[in-house]
Amino acid sequence: MKQSVKIIVGNWKMNGTTADLGEARVLLEGLADQPVDCIVGLCPPATLISAMADVFNDSPVRVGAQDCHAKPGGAHTGSLSVAMLADAGAEMVIVGHSERRAAFGETDADVAAKACAAVAGGLMPIICVGETLEQREAGRALDVVAAQIDGSVPNAIRGVSFMVAYEPVWAIGTGHTPTLDQIAEVHVCIRQRLTALYGPQGQDVAILYGGSVNPGNAVDILAVDQVGGALVGGASLKAADFLAIIRAA
Ligand code: PGA
């Protein structure tokens, strides 16, 4: 069975305080006025998960986290466990975002451990992969992404729902996007890798595209072969833009 309903997930990154929950309310009203046939998630900073989950209570919008610790608890100052995030109201969690891989030195093994912890704790992991500009220019984009899939998607995930996000590092927050052919090429490569690893389950995994998705390019990107949805950063901060992307789906 192939995924048909698109999945649009927003990532607020380190943006937003309670004052910005108004955007979540505007989003909610927009979706109530004109319901959509897609799955919507929003990942605010951890400090807002609980309040945002209250805003979206009884609505189809799911709240997620941007990261988790792989361990269930202990001496990890500043970190949050999966159980804590779920307790706050998260239903999904982004793991292995390139900003965390780059700034915190997270390896594929770290990402796989976090994804494992997420599924064990009942959160849907969104496992991020993507090449740097140097890697793309060296003709290594497909090899890099395939290796990240192999290393970041844990074996324990077999039979459990998870998502993958392809986010070329050079497209994140830059306003530059790959060509539609380039997006298709990598998504097909990821699909082949997932199918080789997990068989029929690999066909069902949603592969989201992320990196400078906006209301102007969403329709074209979401129509690309094997693109199951979008992971949206900057354009998810304003309800009007995020709604336009959701409507594109
Ligand atoms: P962007 O970020 O949409 O602002 O490029 C995407 C992401 O990092 O998930």
Image (cartoon, grey):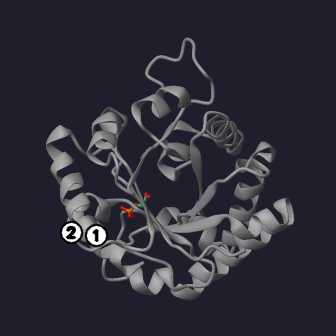
> Residue sitting at 51 percent across and 44 percent down?
93
Residue 169 image offset from top left, x and y in percent: 50, 62
> Residue sitting at 78 percent across and 52 percent down?
159
Residue 100 image offset from top left, x and y in percent: 50, 43
Most foreground residue, 27 or 151: 27
Residue 145 image offset from top left, x and y in percent: 68, 63
Q: In this view, does 203 lie to the left or right of 57?
A: right
> Residue sitting at 26 percent across and 45 percent down?
55
> Around disc 1, counting alpha carbons within 10 Å, would you say few (fewer than 14), some (14 to 19), or many (20 or more)?
many
Q: Is residue 172 above or below residue 189?
A: above
Most foreground residue, 10 or 212: 10
> Around disc 2, counting alpha carbons within 10 Å, would you say few (fewer than 14), some (14 to 19), or many (20 or more)?
some
What residue sits right under mark 1 in the picture? Answer: 243
Q: Report if residue 87 is visible in the image.
A: yes
Q: In which quadrant of the rendered view does residue 89 lie?
A: top left
What residue sits right under mark 2 in the picture? Answer: 240
Most foreground residue, 129 or 36: 36
Where ligand 1 lies, by quadrant? Answer: bottom left
State the CA–CA distance, disc 2 to disc 1. Answer: 5 Å
Contact between marks 2 and 1 (CB within 8 A): the answer is yes
How many circles with numbers are drawn on the protein? 2
Q: In this view, does 223 lie above or below 108?
A: below
Query: Which secondary structure lies at badge 1?
Result: helix
Q: What residue type is labelled 2?
A: Ala
Query: Which secondary structure lies at badge 2?
Result: helix
Q: In this view, does 67 lie above or below 145?
A: above
Q: Is residue 53 left or right of residue 80?
A: left
Residue 170 image offset from top left, x and y in percent: 47, 66
Q: Which amino acid does label 1 sit on?
A: Leu
